[in-house]
Image: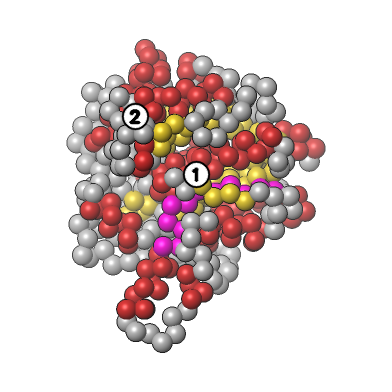
Amino acid sequence: MVSGPVSDGASAPPVLVTGLGALCGFGRGVEALLAGLRRGRPAFGEPTVFDAANHRTRLASEVPEDAPSQPWAPGLSRGDRFAVHAANEAVAHAGLTPSALTRAGVFFGSSNGGLLEGEAFFRRLRAGQARLGLRSVASHQNNGPGDAVARALGCTGPVLTCSSACTSANMALAAALCALRRGECDVALAGGADALSEVTYAGFNALRAIDPAPARPFRADRAGLSMGEGAGVLVLETARHAAARGAVALAELAGAGSTCDAHHMSAPKDDGRGPFEAMRRALADADELPSAVSFVNAHGTGTPHNDVVEARALRELLGDLVRDVPVTSTKSLVGHLLGACGGLEAVACVLGLLHREVHPTAGPGDADPELGLDLVLGGVRRLAAARVAMSNNLAFGGNNCTIVLRRAAS
């Protein structure tokens, strides 16, 4: 999928979500994510994986290392380990056996790959160390996390890494949807993983895009994003494959759409047409109308310009309904996971559909009245019905990608 729906979604066989895996600043596992989302308190602190003393800001959401639930294989980067951990949890949640994964595909988003390990290698090189340990940079490339998952779980189907900055994981989910609809595989592990790195942290600080305080998306005094790390993985199956093994469907990945602003390297185009068209195409691919949307997990970074453009696109898409559709930002709680954010946010959307709730957007203050959105604040918003969730991610280069998730038929 490049610029439109991945296929004719109305006639394509359903693609079901049967397993979830996650880790983030709230801890390891989907239960830790759910509990943190419900608390609504952001998981930010001073980074420990690199020294932030000389940077403009000193705040990020870091995955805690205190209680690993499984041994992590030596030689994997931090991002690789996140990916394998989340994938293992998702596979266990789905009740899949190793034999069922033999032909499974892996579709991952990543922006940093093993950049943190590359930084450490460079420091050792500059220090003149005789034994540099080349193995530490073996997974420096962006495809490291997805490849690590394929090796760890024995997946011999198609393995694809999308690296399109903040839309990477959403694009990976869209690619998995396409492959499953076309019959290229019956099972796919899809999502994303990224770890913090000093180079990326310094870059966003140089752009003045990071808020020294925790991000406050869609507030009048918003001043930038907060960075995070982690992974989110979904097990996706064709409905026929899931039914044959008696799997429980958690949700349906119903549609996807993407566009490019073709405008600027780092700034979105003011008119919001790119994000609007990505949302419109995703809903068309899911054979749904804008009026069907129960809630939106917005890109919601907290940067002054990005929030305005996304709000403009949502108003155009939803029209008069915009004030009645709850909007939230997972990034306000666990930071911006770069290439992995769409994976974790898709997991959050599935949890919202399952529990008929929308988690709050963290940060002080009321929603910016100029944006005209129904921002969820102060606590979990309970929904009488939650059938369709829309998850947006907008990226450098003007890339926009939206996925649509639908509550599983009971």
Q: Which mark is residue 310?
A: 2
Q: Find the magenta span and give its range.
A: 104-115
Element type where label 2 sits in the image:
helix
The extreme top residue here reads 320
| Mark 2 Cα-neighbour bin, 10 Å: few <14, some 14–19, many ≥20 | many
Measuring 74% from the left and 53% from the top, which residue is drawn there? 102
Q: Magenta includes 145?
A: no
Q: Which residue sits furthest front?
A: 262
Q: Is residue 269 left or right of residue 153?
A: left
Residue most extreme to the right: 244
Mark 1 lies on a secondary structure that is helix
**Placement of the C terminus among the 4 image quadrants:** top right
Count of numbered badges drawn on the protein: 2
Q: Where 175 sits versus 319, above or below?
A: below
Q: Earlier in the sequence, mark 1 or mark 2?
A: 1
Q: Please give the label number shown on residue 169.
A: 1
Q: Amino acid at mark 1?
A: Ala
Residue 112 spot, x, y in % from top left: 42, 56
Q: Nearer the viewer, residue 262 or 159?
A: 262
